[in-house]
Amino acid sequence: MKIARHAKILELIEIKEIETQEELAEELKACGFNITQATVSRDIKELRLIKILSDTGKYKYATIIPHDSELADRHVKVFIESLLKVDYASNIVVIKTIPGAAQGAAAAIDALNWPEVVGTIAGDDTIFVLTRNEKNSVEAMEKLKKLIV
């Protein structure tokens, strides 16, 4: 849900001049996201959005680096295609990837900023994802399995 919401935020700020968090929250609600202003505030921080002066003289939200959706889609595709197997033991999720892909996949997992994930360690074809507890391992494993189905 967070990934979809972030993608929608990036899409919205590209096509509309959104000046305030409240405006962004209303746009997201119109798109079917049930969110609060506090969530929007966290999303703005996580996406590292800034305010810039638009052509019309208003300030609007923008990304620091122009968003290249084609490039982002490629990264997601490579990430998904590199995952082979996901399992867990206690509070560690173990991910097997194609050879040489573990470090890139671990960086992608870290970038998701899932609250249940403490951090990752990657080798050549294996990633250990440390979670806060066994329940969080199951949650993270299920999210990852949905990506490779």
Image: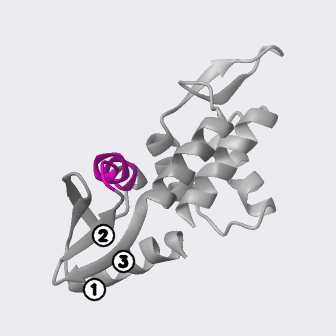
The answer to whether residue 70 shows anywhere in this view is: yes
Q: Where is residue 49 in the image (x, y as percent from the top left)?
A: 54, 33
Frontmost of labels 1 and 3 is 3
Circle 3 — which element? helix
Q: Which residue is drawn at 25% across and 73% down?
A: 93
Q: Which amino acid does label 1 sit on?
A: Lys
Q: What residue type is labelled 3?
A: Met
Q: Where is residue 148 in the image (x, y as percent from the top left)?
A: 50, 71
Mark 2 and mark 1 lie on one chain; the one further toward the N terminus is 2
Whole-number angstrom distance, CA of label 2 to CA of label 1: 9 Å
- For disc 2, the neighbor class at 10 Å (few under 14, some 14 to 19, many from 20) is some
The answer to whether residue 16 shows anywhere in this view is: no
Mark 3 and mark 2 lie on one chain; the one further toward the N terminus is 2
Q: What mark, if any, has residue 141 been given in the picture? A: 3
Label 2 sits on residue: 116
Circle 1 — which element? helix
